Image (cartoon, rainbow, N blue to C red):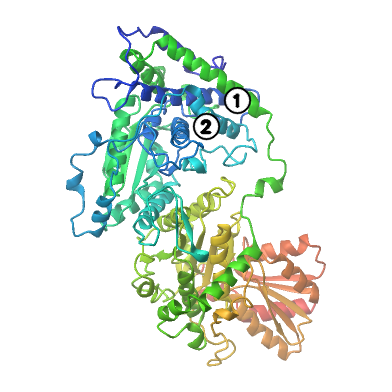
Amino acid sequence: MLCDVTTPQDLDDRFRETLAALPAAERRRDPADPITEDAPLTGAQVLDLFDAQVTSRQLDLAGRWLRSFGEGFYTIGSAGHEGNAAVAAALRPTDPALLHYRSGAFYCLRAAQAAAASPSGGPDSAADPAPTGDPGSTADPTASSDRRASSDPASTVADSTADPDPSGPEPAPAGGFDAYADAARDVLRGMVASSEEPIAGGRHKVFGRADLAVVPTTSTIASHLPRAVGMGLAVERLRRLDSAGRRTGAGVRVGSGAGAAHVPWPPDAIVVCSFGDASVNHASATAAFNTAGWYDHAGLRIPVLFVCEDNGLGISVRSPEGWVEATLRAKPGIRYFSADGADPVRAYAVAAEAAAWVRRNRRPAVLHLRTVRLMGHAGADAESAYRSPAELAEDLDRDPVAATARLLVDAGVATGEELLARYDETGWQVRRLAEEVLGEPKLASAADVVSALAPRRPVRVARAVADAAARASGPGAGARAEAFGGKPPELTGPLTLAQSINAALADGMLDHPQMAVFGEDVAAKGGVYGVTKGLRDRFGPARVFDTLLDETSVLGLGLGAGLAGMLPVPEIQYLAYLHNAEDQLRGEAATMRFFSQGAFRNPMVVRVAGLAYQEGFGGHFHNDNSVAVLRDVPGLVVAVPARPDDAAPMLRTCLASAAVDGSVCVFLEPIALYHTRDLYADGDGEWLAGYPEPGAWVAGHVPIGRARVYRVGSADDLTIITFGNGVRMSLRAAAVLAEEGVGTRVVDLRWLAPLPVADIIRESSATGRVLVVDETRRSGGVGEGVIAALVDAGYVGAARRVAGVDSFVPLGPAARHVLVSTDAITDGARTLLAR
């Protein structure tokens, strides 16, 4: 057993003493009867809660045992938080859940729910297992006064599908440890980094399984909350979608062709996400609460239940008394509920009330679940260094597993001796499973580790582009002509970069019915630079909409929408503002496939206006040239279209890659080139380009990681490798050098991640002289990666860099002192040629 695992609180011994001291009730109660008079739970259902709680507790002890001999790699446990099992019981197993790392009992109960709901062990049955949410007796009697006025169309839709079965289904029988064995094995495999762990495959210990509708999150600071809000928005949007064949059920396919999306949750699902009390103070949580409340205030529905598991501590830092409640109560547009995790009946009743309110009204709420923390923050945490013995003893007195046991004994459902036997049997079974998973294989190579990171299937992506072209010129030709007002972009003459992106976005919206474009100012205004002009008029406010001014929330909406089956295309207004929300890309978007082995994905194409060289409008925040933060994110695709004839095919590739492979792409658009028309001289129009008709899309397809080469003169003397604004400047420099008899190859990288290494090596080796023109900074810029690629490939020719100065971009003419110029490129080339 695991009872020999000691903790500073001697938790196991204390629990045994508690059970042994419980006096037997005067009479036994039928487990099918309510646990107390008028209680919403039967004795059997409370036994289910107890089994889930005990399984979670024994898993925590197993984690310490495994760590004691170097075979366990994760000891943050759920002890003291087991009251969250009641929250799981109040929800449906088809309600998507993003779980805090102390939600072990929730995960265990969810696994048992799903097993009871479907003979195959999955959650696809229409029946809700018990304990269930939406009991009619716990519905909020004041909810009707909180609803929007009848003039709000959302309220009518919400009411029409609310609580189809208010009485709830029949309860599932208490199943002992067998009902929780799979969940226990999942958790233990995560602890030992087994490659057979079903969600992350040994890459991290997470709570997650697709068949349980539990979305993995590695967050410790609530960075998953913005995603949860996005999921809620998408669930509600898809629920209202008026499409043929829409039905109530666990999974529905909406749309057709490349844009067809599998909606993974029932139309009346709600999203639940749990987090700790210290995370209430984090910017990500603040953003999520604010966004949910902002949309609610605007009359839009976000069916999300936030669950704050409040143990009063963030490692060693205490939450000030009353602060968490005051903070959560003060969130506008979010209904507040509160319960004590040490009172399973009341916790269930309040959680069911909160879930029913969210499900009926399609509005956000927060459940403030008071808990305690037992066994410290993690295995190495010595709580005695910052907590008094009296405080530790007080928490032990509020042990939620002991509270559930006390309730069962007092009600006459079981004796203390019977519950202790149940506890020990679970301990033996967990120990047995722990010993089994110890022998399972670990990830054996770097290839194994990265295999799930960001799969690339270029043939399928190319086929998706070809299929889109066939639809646009075939069955979709009429709709396309109508969308473009009878004059498609290929007939409008040469386009600027901005116009080409606009047209490609419209073609993307036509081909991907689940595609949505959103961000600050993208709808009514059509974007600060007019790039999204007219899209809302063509495709409606449900698919092209303005968001609040917060980049974390914009990306969070995209992350949740992608997970729900949409193809989100959020816009970040300026590159400098992306840094406010970096973790949503790095910690949330890029990790989803990595930590779920592809079971979940969040396809997304993030449009970002950036880079420098704006004339007459400047300063750092509108001329940011820092892209290292993007190139450093594993698996992220970073595209930089410089010319109009590259922009459309590159955007089509990104959309196809997101739809086919679940890729997360950043489409970095050079602001200074948006409306540029000329290349060499005023009025030459050589930076404009025609828009290809659908029949030419296949021939013009641009695969991820392939460069474009311009040959000036003989192209035998010098290779210039560049991107973005550097392409135009390098072509101008190459023209000057051509007059001096120098032939140049100008290589437009087009993709900053992954770099087109093969093209770099080939074009560099052809001349033996390489000038890297990098408009980003010398330190941490793109040029460093290019030079490193050359060195790694054994390039032996000459190489030189022309790069931006390690400085922020100043206002006005001062910017010329720190940015690359055409003259600097020409001078650098001459210096290189003189060697």
Q: What residue is shown at x 66% (from left), y 78% (from top)? A: 825
Q: Which of the 4 image quadrants contains residue 701?
A: bottom right
- Tell me, for residue 183, which label it has, or none: 2
- Name the foreground residue: 114 vs 713: 114
Choose the circle earlier in sequence order: 2 or 1.
2
| Residue, far bottom | 683
x and y percentages locating residue 606 in the rendered image: 49, 63
- Kindly report the distance in space between the C-alpha atoms of the residues bearing marks 2 and 1: 11 Å
- Name the foreground residue: 7 vs 407: 407
Q: Which of the 4 image quadrants contains residue 437?
A: top right
Disc 2: CA contacts within 10 A as few (<14), some (14-19) or many (>=20) = many
Residue 611 visible in rendering: no
Q: Left of 112 or right of it: where is 790? A: right
Residue at disc 2, secondary structure: helix
Q: Label 1: which residue? A: 433
Say above or below: 97 vs 62.
below
x and y percentages locating residue 772 in the rendered image: 69, 71
Q: Left of 637 or right of it: where is 306? A: left
Residue type highlighted by circle 1: Leu
Quadrant assignment for the C terminus: bottom right
x and y percentages locating residue 670 in the rendered image: 52, 73
Disc 1: CA contacts within 10 A as few (<14), some (14-19) or many (>=20) = some
Quadrant assignment for the N terminus: top right
Say above or below: 534 vs 462.
below
Say above or below: 129 vs 385.
below
Residue type highlighted by circle 2: Ala
Residue at disc 1, secondary structure: helix
x and y percentages locating residue 325 in the rendered image: 29, 37
